Each structure stands twice: as C-alpha cells, then as structure tokens.
Amino acid sequence: MTADHNSQQSTPSTLAPPSRLVIASRESRLAMWQAEHVRDLLRGLYPACNVEILGMTTEGDRVLDRALNEIGGKGLFIKELEVALLEGRADLAVHSLKDVPMEMPEQFVLAAVLHREDPRDAFVSNKFADLESLPPGARLGTSSLRRAAQIRARFPQLDIRSLRGNVNTRLAKLDRDEYDAIVLAAAGLKRLGFAQRIRSIIAPEVSLPAAGQGALGIETRADRPEMVQWLAPLVDAASTAQVSAERVVSRLLGGSCRVPLAAFCIPEGKSGLLLTARVAAEDGSEVLESVARSDSDSVAAAEEIGAQVAQALIAQGAERWLGEH
C-alpha cells in the first residue's frame, strides 16, 4: 500500500472536481451504510458532484449454508464489485478492509483507507454479561476461524458453532435462542445503531482483531489516477499505517479466512506503532504470538514491523497451520 499512500500526498490543485461518481456496494445493511457514509463524505468534498450507489449481491452473500473457508474465502464479497469497476459501471467500491484480499489484482488499487472505527470484537448475549460468564457447553456463534480458535484456547468448555449471515440475521438467530451468545465486530454493530446490543468488548488479549478490522477501504481501477487524487482527502494517515502493518503480516502468512490469523496495530507513544499478531491451531490447542514496535508511524515503518512479525511467527512454526493457503 506504500505506493498508493505516497501518491495521495501530491494531489494537484489543477484537477477538476468530478461531476459524477458511482459507488459499487454489496446490498447488506452494513455495506450500504458504509457506501452511504462515503457518498456523504464525497458530496461534502464535491457539492456539485452527483454521487450514486450501485447495489449488488455477491456470491459471498448468496451462499450462506457453508463457511467462507469452504466456498472460496472473503474475496467472494468483492469479485462482482470489481467486475463493475472494470466494466465502467462504477468508479469506486467501498469495502470492509478485512474483506479485501491481501493480494489485489494488478488492475485495482486500494486508493484510500478511512478513519478506523473500533476494531475490537464484541460479545453479544441476552443472558450473559461476558465470555467469562458463559457456563460449560454454552453455544457461542461466530463466523470467524480467528475468533473461534482464540476463544477455544481460553474457554475450551464452550460449544462454538458456525454463524453466517448479515448482522441482522445473526442477531435474529441469537434472539431465537439458537445461540447463548455471539461474537461480532464492534464496528459493524456501532455503525448500524446496535451499540446497545454489545454486552461487553472482548479484550484483544483474548480475541485479537483481524487485519484491517473496523477500517473502510476504497478500491478503484489502477488506470484511473484521477480517482486516487479525488479520494485523497478521505485518507486517514494513522489508520493507513496501522492497517498496512496488519495486512503485511496477513499477506506474508497467506492470510485468508482459511487461517486463524489475527494482526492488530495500535499507536504507541508520540509517533510509534505497536503490532501484535497471532496464528493458532483451529481447535485452539496452540496459539503463537509475536510483537514488534516502531518509533515511526510511517507506512514504510509499518510494513517493516509487519514483515518482522510475520517472520517471527514463521520461525515459531506457524507454517504448519498455513499449509497451501
């Protein structure tokens, strides 16, 4: 992401503002909230611009009876949106950054990372206050191998079950008593107005977030530098550096929803970064962790500590879980 970031620092004042922009988005409530959020930001930047949203249903939305790691991974959520970009039906696509594959096709560029919402995981239950309160055998729902592996490591007595669907669907399953508790991203709940459903925030020590969790990324075609320039005012430098560190870890370890991998970077001191990453056995029987620090919060420094952490995890033996992924 370094090249993308650097290109955003030299926006020419001579570039005419856009007259029309079309945002490709999934049609789930959360995806539409994200697209509408970006639409409103763009309308604020370019008042004369007609900003529209092209809603689409992706393969990841259509197939809900199998786990993501069985049907092709998170990239299923963005393929149709990328086709719309290539065909010129849309100018940009808005994604939850944790759904964006670490290796992007060369036709596309991640033009902007916006200010990050709460990146942590949230515990939601109608009966219990937190993970520690769950009795043995309690049914805990999550769609994430990362969450499941880390929680199993701490709470092996729980019955952790797969949970797919959008946020509303997952909450409805909880309310029908199909689960005693569920774990969701805090950011999504807050963005949709469900903050009151959060019983407790799960500490990163227990469930380290996914790379890019809570951040929105805007994708566009690599052959459209004017889009990168128009989007430059939306770039959040701190969030860009933090997710850059996380995504390097995931990329070097072949991270996808097939691998219980977590990476979380936070600011440290006046201008430094602290990166923590974990790789786990799916059954939670073993969790490897590595930590690295930088006294600079530049994207280059972030990518450097990302590489350090990935190599440290490989040295600890993480590759035995990564397989061919």
Image (tube, rainbow, N blue to C red):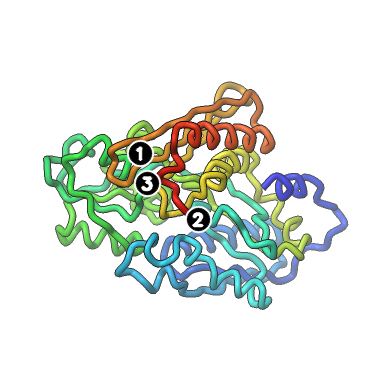
What's the residue at 17%, 37% (across, down)?
133
Q: Residue furthest right?
A: 14
Q: Amino acid at mark 3?
A: Arg
Cα gap from disc 1 to disc 2, whole angstroms: 19 Å
Q: Which residue is mark 3?
A: 146
How many C-alpha atoms fall within 10 Å of the one at disc 1: few (<14), some, or many (≥20)? many
Pointer 3 with pointer 1, Cβ within 8 A? yes
Q: Quadrant of residue 283?
A: top left
What amino acid is labelled 2 in the image?
Answer: Ser
Left or right of residue 273, residue 175 in this image: left
Q: Amino acid at mark 1?
A: Ser
Left or right: 89, with 209 as reference point: right
Residue under the image location 50 percent in, 63 percent down? 75
> Residue at left 53%, top 66%?
78
In the figure, is residue 310 to the left or right of 128?
Answer: right
Residue 210 image offset from top left, x and y in percent? 45, 45
Residue occupying image coordinates x 66% and y 78%: 87
Q: Is residue 33 left or right of residue 163?
A: right
Q: Nearer the viewer, mark 3 or mark 2?
A: 3
Q: Give the Cα distance between marks 3 and 1.
A: 8 Å
Q: CA distance from mark 3 to mark 2?
A: 17 Å
What residue is disc 2 on?
A: 96
Q: Secondary structure at mark 1?
A: loop
SS category of the residue bearing label 2:
strand
As drawn, the label of residue 207 is 1
Quadrant hosting residue 267 = top right
Among numbered discs 1 and 2, the one appearing first in the sequence: 2
Q: Are dots 1 and 2 in contact, CB under 8 Å?
A: no
Instruction: State which tag comes first along the sequence, 3 or 1.
Output: 3
Query: Of residues 227 and 245, which is closer to you in this image?
Result: 245
